[in-house]
Image: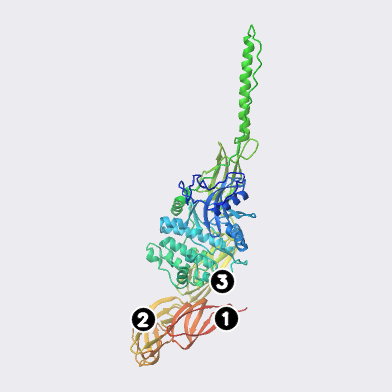
Amino acid sequence: MAAYEPVGHPLTASVGSCPACGGDLLAGDRFCGGCGAPVPQPEDTELLVHLQRATLAEHEIQGILGRGGMGLVYLAHDVALNRKVAIKVLPLALLQGDAAVERFRREARIAASLRHRHITSVFGLKETSQVVFFIMEYVEGRTLDAILRDEGPLAIDVVEAILLDAASALSYAHRHDVVHRDLKPANIIVDVEGMAMITDFGVAKVSTAQGLTSAGSTVGSPKYMSPEQWSGKATSLSDQYALGCVAYELLAGRPPFQGESIAALMKQQLFDAPRPLGELRADCPPALVEGLGRMLEKDPADRWPSLEAAIAALGLRPLSADAPARLQLARFAKRGHDVRALPRTPQSPIPVNKVLARPAPPPERAPPLRRPIPWAAAAVVVVVVGGGAYAVHALRRAAETRDGIAIIEITDAPTTLAPGERAPIVARAKNARGELVASVPIVWSSTDPAVAFPSADSVVTAIGVGSATLTASGGGRSASVRVLVAPASASVAALRIVPAAVRLAAGDSARLTATAEDRSGQLITGRPLEWTSSAPGVVLVSATGQASAVAPGTAIVTASADGKTAQATVTVVPAGIASLDVRPARSTIRVSQSERLSAFARDASGKSLGARTPEWISSNPGVAAVSSTGIVTGLAAGSARITALTGGATSAPVTVTVTGVGAPAPAVLQLLVTPWAFVSIDGVPHGQLTRLVDTLRAGVGHRVHFEHSGFAAVDTAVTLEPGEARLLRIQLTPRNP
């Protein structure tokens, strides 16, 4: 271990004692034999010395909570506020790199700008010539990866509670233009109140600022990285994908992708579909399976437009503090060594001044009296006894004045809170002179924890509507304050409807979801909304936002609250089969070979009506004959066009090419289109699509056309080799106004 000189006070951690419990450490120990805490390494000890010098008289460092690539996290005691905090320190090895230091500063600034119940708070950033660190909220609990390791797959309601907390925190960050980019179980902490909190914004990205990461570079954890992150293009939809991976792992007990190398993980994330969650968890509700499946879509455009929309679609609702899922999470957080081994917040010692009475000098011997006077002796005894008693009383009063507790003072106490809000509440013990007595621990209690609950770190959390009296006790004294928890009175500053545009067939319906926000961007829940339709003869809308298509046409559906409105456009098209899609759209077979064609019906809105058994017609039966079940058989070299008819609808012709023996193998073209487009290949329309897989003739050029109203059309030519499988990504750009 690196040698160092004492800094004027005993070190909390040293070579010979455990930083957590103070037990003896033997040479070669990697973990403490008493509590199991890790033994500091030489570089850790040097860093600890610098940190203690920088925090002298403000914080008492107690031990290491954890370590990562961008810093060590220490548990510390805030002397002035008498609470536990966490201090994240940049390792000495990274202190010389300007980019690393600036990235560390940026993490602190980003986290400090986000004030949310489910995001760890940052209190301050400090730097010296030898150490850079920031002070943040200490969350007593366990990370999700530790809980998953010990508990295995979690219950459905527990996962939904975690999903709701994390989505709420991420949505808040996204509204403030912050993308986390490294969400994983290790960066989600469950505290002892059963709440999930997101931490570690070390690689977070502010969309409105120039970042430190090079363009196109990859950041994140491979098991949870979205396909677009592998090319350095992370957005809020990337956080949605990562949260879907985390939820999948919590339910299945394993992440959706498990490659043995980064290259294998990259391939799976880009091209492979995860094993269906319903196969691993038969008790998982279909809505949850489908909702998480959409969060894990490869194409960001196919995911939920926002996490608020995902939560609304999944039907997740806020939970009370005494909900079974919260209580179960609280039990998980309190289990395990990582909570029990943490030292308690110490009582910062204050030197005790000892007042000793000097013994009186021995009296000079007087010559003995021949005639003692009894009354004089009695008077002397009374004076001595009385003086001694007075001296003892004076000394006791002086000691009480210096060190005793005269009053508990509560400051910064909130008078009114809304459910879910948190606020600091500080209590200090003072002596008769008004001096702070920091050695006395303060214990908080509440007359109704279901209304308001004060935590050990001097933060009160509003749980439910009502009032509660909070009491701070210490040193035989106490003080109380009353807190009222009332429904949120913030006015609605903005409304949003998801989805903003809907296309329905007559007789169908769709649920519209409206979210309300206050001026700070916080979601407002429980606020009544008024729904109206501009054309009730076309679209009817219920009080809960359920839009029902009545007749063909277009209607504007409006949601209103507190004078604010939001609108969605609902287009109703005639019911019935509007088109038939035949797959594959193009085929090459050899003489005597057969292939099955399938027909799928769609209504005018593009909604699939399922497979159909139509009438099949071949333009050249001598080359390719088609049966009533859609089986095409090659009879002679040449080509034929196969058409399907049913319900008054006729499909686009499918070209079947029949070749002799040794004909080149066909090629496969896969298309991914953002946002969506009407796609045609060689003049044959394929409908409104975001993705397409088609078999094309190899060795010849094929023209592919993409068209979407309001966007510039795209034309491209593709020539494929025999047996080739090619992925073509198309990003449409809006037309100039």
- The amino acid pointed to by label 2 is Thr
* Contact between labelled residues 3 and 2, with CB atoms less than 8 Å apart: no
Q: Is residue 104 visible?
A: yes
* Contact between labelled residues 2 and 1, with CB atoms less than 8 Å apart: no
Q: Earlier in the sequence, mark 1 or mark 2?
A: 2
Residue drawn where x is 33% and y is 89% of the image: 592
Marker disc for residue 245: none
Q: Nearer the viewer, residue 369 or 337?
A: 369
The percent coordinates of residue 630 (x first, y second) are 35, 84
* Contact between labelled residues 1 and 3, with CB atoms less than 8 Å apart: no
- The amino acid pointed to by label 1 is Ala
Crowding near pointer 3: few (<14 within 10 Å), some, many (20+)? few
The percent coordinates of residue 4 (x first, y second) are 59, 49
Instruction: Give the quarter of the figure containing the C terminus.
Output: bottom right
Which residue, given by chain and number where applicable, does mark 3 sit on? Answer: 216
Q: Given this view, does label 1 or label 2 mark the residue nearer the observer? A: 1
Q: Nearer the viewer, residue 553 or 62?
A: 62
Q: Secondary structure under badge 1?
A: loop
Marker disc for residue 712: 1
Q: Earlier in the sequence, mark 2 or mark 3?
A: 3
Q: Is residue 313 visible?
A: no
The percent coordinates of residue 460 (x first, y second) are 55, 49
Q: Nearer the viewer, residue 424 or 375?
A: 375
Q: Nearer the viewer, residue 332 or 309?
A: 332
Q: Is residue 730 above or below residue 436?
A: below
Q: CA distance from mark 1 to mark 2?
A: 38 Å
Q: Residue 612's image quarter?
A: bottom left
Q: CA distance from mark 2 to mark 3?
A: 49 Å
Q: Secondary structure under badge 2?
A: loop
Q: Residue 693's image quarter?
A: bottom left
Which residue, given by chain and number where applicable, does mark 2 sit on? Answer: 613
Residue drawn where x is 36% and y is 85% of the image: 615
